[in-house]
Image: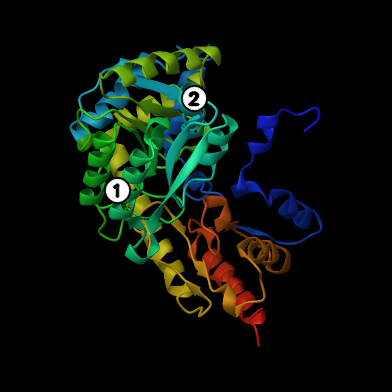
Amino acid sequence: MGFLSERSKYTKNDIEALDAVSEKLRKAGRKIISLNRGDPARYFPTPQYVIDAYIDALNARKTFYSRAQGTVELQEAVCGRYRRMHNLHISPDDIIATAGVTEGILFMNSAIVNPGERAIILKPYFAIYTTYLERNHGIPIFQQYDEKDSWNVHVEKLRRSLAQLRKSNGIKHVKYMLITNPNNPTGTVLRREILEEIVSLANEYDIFLISDEIYDELTFNGAKFTSVSELAKGVPHMLLNGISKSYDATGFRVGYMVLPEGDKKSVILKKKLGDYARARISINTPAEYAATAAMNNFGEHGRVIRKMVGEIEKRVNFSMKLLGENPYLSTVRPNGAFYVFPKIDLSQLKFKDDVRFVTSLLEKEGVQTVWGSGFGEPSHFRMVSLAEKDVLEHAINKINDFCRKNAKK
């Protein structure tokens, strides 16, 4: 690696891997439809009461370093949110504020993963999960969401894999198991009975369970979200969340880690995560006060989120309808978040893999998506369905035409 460190080779983000290409095309006068970043604030204005709270914090000169683990007001607001939504009774000391969920993932891996240790990650997964694990020289053990079962977890396969790890004595090297619910990139909302099985397995095999629940209020098509916190009482676990998605404030960079349990692992980890927070001093102080206002104004939030989710549901289902006209793609219907994750029938197209498909789609048609390989699932691509219907229609028509033009004869 020369001047760069060995671990630096693991630092990448496939979601933005083609940004330099799209920027070059824009400078050349091309119109690019960007459907790669899951950024709701670009399409749904952040609620005015949240903006006003940020401005109030600035006017009150709350521009100093806050407490490293988050303001007390923010911690209490998070506690109130989980009490209202999930009947979870936690204390402010169970909350550590982070600069988005990604910093929480960084802290968590840095705190508990030694070189050669392992983590169970279900795929497809959010692209950053493996980045921070491997940067700490940890090794992912991949388990599979089942596309044939609407991308739910194949519990029996997971059970057999854990049993084999125990038999080979490899289970002692597993530091955590990480799930995403609702899922990025598939939009799956895991069924409650499946989550119960996952919690049971984590308990049986003494594996620390981590649930990324950043899309917890973005569910539709009749799906019901269940937080791991409702099921894992007494089981060591962590929740990752923040205001980026459900509170439509991506650029504020306010996330948080919740460690509700008092077991030895959780107590040790809470203390060390606090050390990591102090090492980076604090997150964005005015944004913390805005986040506090967002969570405490739950009446206004309820009205805003219902309207936003209703519109996301329409746009996702509209995308599904148009993609359904393409014989070269197949897509499981999402019930959460705002992504669609089509499977590409490469046997019928002139592309070797999903990376070439996505790159050519951008270069030839000006539509930027993300290759499925970046989420651990080759032969797929992820498309964000947040844009207005006319933009989505234009983009998907281009995708469908692109497939027809590149079909094998």
The label number, if any, that marks residue 98 in the structure image: none
The label number, if any, that marks residue 159 in the structure image: 1
- Closest to the observer: 395 or 152? 152
User: How busy is the neighbourhood of tag 2: few (under 14 within 10 Å), some, or many (20 plus)?
Assistant: many
Q: Please name the residue shown 66% across and 71% down the image.
A: 351
- Locate the N terminus by quadrant: top right
Instruction: Find numbered disc 2 in the image and state the secondary structure of the residue it sits on.
Output: helix
Contact (Cβ within 8 Å) of mark 2 with mark 1: no
Q: CA distance from mark 2 to mark 1?
A: 28 Å
Q: Can see residue 34?
A: yes
Please name the amino acid that badge 1 sits on: Arg
Instruction: Give the vertical position of 229 relative to 34 (above or below).
Output: above
The label number, if any, that marks residue 107 in the structure image: 2
Q: Is residue 248 left or right of residue 404?
A: left
**Outermost left residue:** 87
Instruction: Give the vertical position of 390 relative to 169 (above or below).
Output: below
Q: Position of residue 37 (x, y in %)?
A: 56, 49
Q: Please name the residue shown 57% across and 51% down the image.
A: 374
**Outermost bottom residue:** 409
Instruction: Find numbered disc 1 in the image and state the secondary structure of the residue it sits on.
Output: helix
Q: Is residue 11 left or right of residue 25?
A: left
Q: Position of residue 51 (x, y in %)?
A: 46, 32
Q: Can see residue 69?
A: no
- Closest to the observer: 90 or 191? 191
| Mark nearer the N terminus (2 vs 1) | 2
Instruction: Give the vertical position of 281 relative to 239 (above or below).
Output: above
- Locate the C terminus by quadrant: bottom right
Q: Position of residue 363 (x, y in %)?
A: 73, 64
Q: Please name the residue shown 29% across and 17% down the image.
A: 264
Q: Position of residue 47 (x, y in %)?
A: 42, 39
Q: How many marks?
A: 2
Q: Nearer the viewer, mark 2 or mark 1?
A: 1
